[in-house]
Image (cartoon, rainbow, N blue to C red):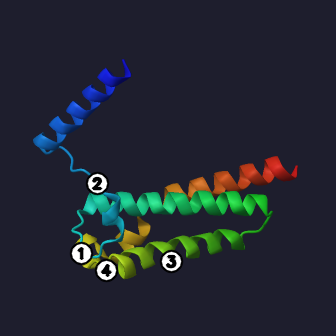
Amino acid sequence: MKESKSVKLNSQQHQQHENGHFSPFKFAKLLDPEASWDKDQLGDVLHWIRQVVALFCGLLWGAIPVVGGIWIFIFLAISTGIIYGYYAMILKIDEEEFGGHAALLQEGLFASMTLFLLAWILVYSLAHF
């Protein structure tokens, strides 16, 4: 039964590739400065990098325990610095093709802020009260 499910899944993926509905994503592309990026793909990658950073910082700061509003600004600085470093120094893309620095730095910001605060508050509350 598992084999039939995997065969169906592979055939569906193959059909989608042939129809051109989506292109396969390779992880090697994440660090390749010569790779071509479409605006949606780059936005998705930046969004998910920011989510990982938010979850890591929220869990870490909740476990340490740190308190105070300054840590929110420190998270924003770390998150924005990582995103800027990734697209400007690793990928070396022309940011004007993707809407400028503001559009790229803003990608996933509010969702990551929510995840960061949720993780920080939950871990802090559960571990220290």
Residue type at tag 1: Glu
* Disc on the earlier residue, 1 or 2: 2
Q: Residue at x 24, y 66 (%)?
A: 37
Q: Residues within 10 Å of mark 2 (few under 14, many from 20)?
A: few
- Looking at the rendered structure, which numbered label has been put on residue 56? none
Residue type at tag 3: Gly
Alpha-carbon distance for marks 3 and 2?
A: 25 Å
Alpha-carbon distance for marks 2 and 4?
A: 19 Å
Alpha-carbon distance for marks 4 and 3?
A: 15 Å
Residue 48 drawn at (x, y percent): 45, 57
Residue depth check, mark 4 versus mark 1: number of the one nearer the observer: 1
Residue 124 drawn at (x, y percent): 78, 54
Residue depth check, mark 3 versus mark 2: number of the one nearer the observer: 2
**Label pair 2/4, CB-CB below 8 angstroms:** no
**Which residue bears the numbered disc 4?**
92
Residue depth check, mark 2 versus mark 4: number of the one nearer the observer: 2
Q: Residue at x 38, y 22 (%)?
A: 2
Q: Residue at x 79, y 64 (%)?
A: 64
**Which residue bears the numbered disc 3?**
81
Alpha-carbon distance for marks 4 and 1?
A: 8 Å
Q: Is residue 122 above or below residue 71?
A: above
**Which residue bears the numbered disc 1?**
34
Residue 103 drawn at (x, y percent): 35, 69
Of residues 8 and 44, which is closer to you in this image?
8
**Label pair 3/2, CB-CB below 8 angstroms:** no
SS at mark 2 in the image: loop
Residue type at tag 4: Lys
* Disc on the earlier residue, 3 or 1: 1
* Disc on the earlier residue, 2 or 4: 2
> Which image quadrant is residue 107 in?
bottom left
**Which residue bears the numbered disc 2?**
25
